[in-house]
Image (cartoon, helix red, strand yellow):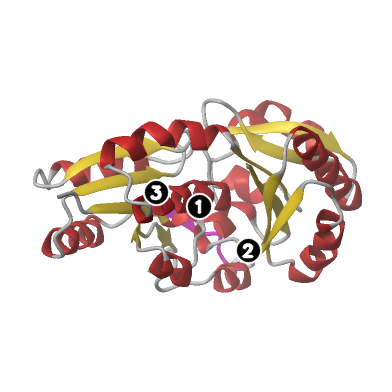
Amino acid sequence: MQKIAILTDSASDLSLETLKENNIHLFPLRILYSNEEFEDKISITPEEVYNRLSTEIPTTSLPSPKTSAKVLKDLEANGYTHVIAISVSSGLSGTFNAFRLALEEHPNLTSYVYDSKIIGFPQGVLVLEAARLVKEKKSYDEIIQELPRIRENITGYFTLDTLEYLKKGGRIGKLAGTIGQFLHLKPIITMDEHGVYHPYAKVRGRKQSLSKMIEVLKTHLDESKCKVWILQGGCMDEALLFAESVKALHNCEFMGITPVGAMVAVHSGPGMMGLAIEKV
């Protein structure tokens, strides 16, 4: 009999409470300062990252091999036979390979690693769907076959106060060639088919960028009913106002406002506003 574990990394921006409620297991990414190291979700919060940005911009790193090994040993000890790991985009992080290498050390676990080619809560939505399939008693093979179809129905968009932190973190992707054009503009950013950042649209100013995201959301809602989450990094008051516009849209099943995690906060800085959209 199969006992299937769903495993993800902390770039998925699922809260510890949500992980526990859905029996999802975590490889926490690391936040590195010059003389300190923290584990995302475990020992540092996004607020702590924002508060320290004026003195030091940290870097992010792969999950600790020691922590990863413990997670997998615990799965074996608890009778799990199969693991489906869903990683942050391999176009942004080496976490996909870190999952594969860690799981190779545990041959008793039948495992599959899926590259989500997204980041943040859109990745989290995919992980939650996989966990739902486990609850529905789907088999290991059935879940693996379903993942690409589910992924096709999930997308995300976000805008930032500044591209400074993305640039310093080396995560600028296809925005690099046009960064000079963005000095006075607020790009709406999404992920391309390769799982790297892509400038979907360029608008002038914060107010216009949020209006543009509503327009983008409407194009999805015109095609189908969608579940919609608002993603915010250090701008909750603004997110609450933005939510009123989102809730009013036809075909929108508003799911709530969710904060970004510490790993995403490092690369976005304060003022990140985004949307996770799932076609239903």
Find the distance from the CA under tag 2 to the CA under tag 3: 23 Å
Q: Which dot marks residue 251?
A: none
User: Which residue is painted at 19% across and 45% down in the image?
Assistant: 103
Q: Secondary structure at mark 3?
A: helix
User: Which residue is painted at 88% across and 47% down in the image?
Assistant: 211
Q: Is residue 19 magenta?
A: no
Given this view, does label 2 or label 3 mark the residue nearer the observer?
A: 3
In the image, taking residue 3 as reference, residue 272 lies left or right, namely right
Q: Residues within 10 Å of mark 2 (few under 14, many from 20)?
A: many
Q: Quadrant of residue 269?
A: bottom right
Find the distance from the CA under tag 1 to the CA under tag 2: 11 Å
In the image, taking residue 119 as reference, residue 203 lies left or right, namely right
Pointers 1 and 2 in contact (C-beta within 8 Å): yes
**Amino acid type, residue under disc 3 in the picture:** Leu
The x and y percentages for residue 199 are 71, 32
The x and y percentages for residue 133 are 39, 48
Query: Main SS of the magenta segment?
Result: loop
In the image, taking residue 280 as reference, residue 170 lies left or right, namely left
Whether residue 39 is visible: no
User: Which residue is painted at 23% across and 61% down in the image?
Assistant: 71
Q: Residues within 10 Å of mark 1 (few under 14, many from 20)?
A: many
The residue nearer to you, when weighing 190 against 62, is 190
**Amino acid type, residue under disc 1 in the picture:** Gly
Q: Secondary structure at mark 1?
A: helix
Residue on which the image places disc 3? 133
The residue lying furthest to the left in this view is 108
